[in-house]
Amino acid sequence: MKFSLRFNNDLPARDYVTYAQAAETVGFDQFWVSNDLFLRSAPVILSAIATATERIEIGTCILNPYTIHPAEIAMFAATLDELSGGRFNLGISSGAEDFIGWLGLDFDLPRTRIVESIHAINMLTSNKNAATRGRVLCWTEEAWLRFESRRRVPIYLGAMSPKMLEEIGAIADGGLPLLFPPEHYQNVLPHVERGLQRAGRNLDDIDLAACIWCSISADQAAAEAVLADKIAYYGHAMSPLILGQMGLTQKDFEPIRRAYHLEGDTEGARRMVTSRMLRIGIAGATDALIERLEGLAELGVRHLSFGPPLGPDILGTIHAIGRDVIPRYKKR
């Protein structure tokens, strides 16, 4: 079993170094940082982590080819891989249409854009010419890295929709499917397997992470409060597939979205998060976490990825998972 931590890019930059060092100490394999708009820069954060750790792999979850050109994504990837000594993984996907819309950009051809971007980035970090004439990318013969990438950087595809989940199996080295709730893995897997079959591969050929949200604390109310904050911020941007299985729609999140993003009423938005919405993640002590993880283990999950908010005491959560969870599942 592999273990990773995922963070939003909303914390003070120096905190990530502390958390990454702690994660490395207690046995985590990977450390991922998102690059959501108008928050802190993941490539900068990961550069700091790369120089402060020795073993743990680092990655972006995710960069998107709308706000960052795929050529620049390849530059980031090869440079961070060089800086970290070959420990960088590139997490990429189309991003959330709602957030892309903040910039007045058209969210056109997301699947095609990702497929073409992954191919081009693979060519560049393989030190090959990336000239291409696709539906989205049209690059000339001048499209090649002017420095040597130490390897083809592994690409993990973030996904929630059926078509993008299928591309994890077809073209990626790994997958970062968001499981809201965690039990959603059993619905995700068939789509990934369809892509694997299309590419003549099997599940052993990719690193498929079961990406969950959790908030760990012995104080149940405190755990639920910080999870509610994350749900209030991101809930409206979740796919209909995700929300539908919990009996929710994007319309249910519209008052929350308005309160949080338009009115700045974060406390009011949090109060509108219902108990059903809280089932998107896991809140409580580590025994509550383990109870929900058992089902994932029975489904054959081989990579458990713990994501935000993690808890009111993030360092305490890292040590709690290292103490109570990693030893339990490490050899499964």
Image: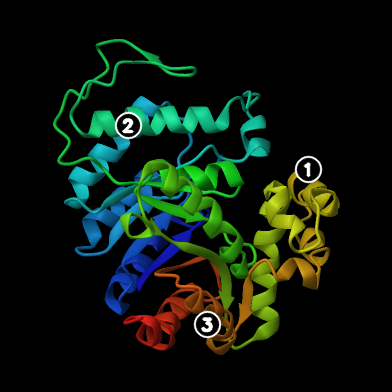
**Residue 156: x, y in percent?**
39, 48
* Spatial CA span between label 2 and label 1: 36 Å
Determine whether, in the image, residue 49 is placed left or right of residue 197. left
Instruction: Say which residue appears at 36% left-offset and 45% top-offset.
Output: 200
- Nearer to us of marks 1 and 3 is 3
Res 262 label: 1
Tag 3 residue: 294
| Above or below, 204 relative to 260 | below
Q: Secondary structure at mark 3?
A: helix
Q: Earlier in the sequence, mark 2 or mark 1?
A: 2
Choose between 181 and 256: the one closer to the eye: 181
Label 3 CA crowd tier, 10 Å (few <14, some 14–19, many 20+): few
Choose between 84 and 41: the one closer to the eye: 84
Res 279 label: none
Q: Secondary structure at mark 1?
A: helix
* Spatial CA span between label 2 and label 3: 37 Å
- Nearer to us of marks 2 and 3 is 3
Which quarter shows the N terminus? bottom left
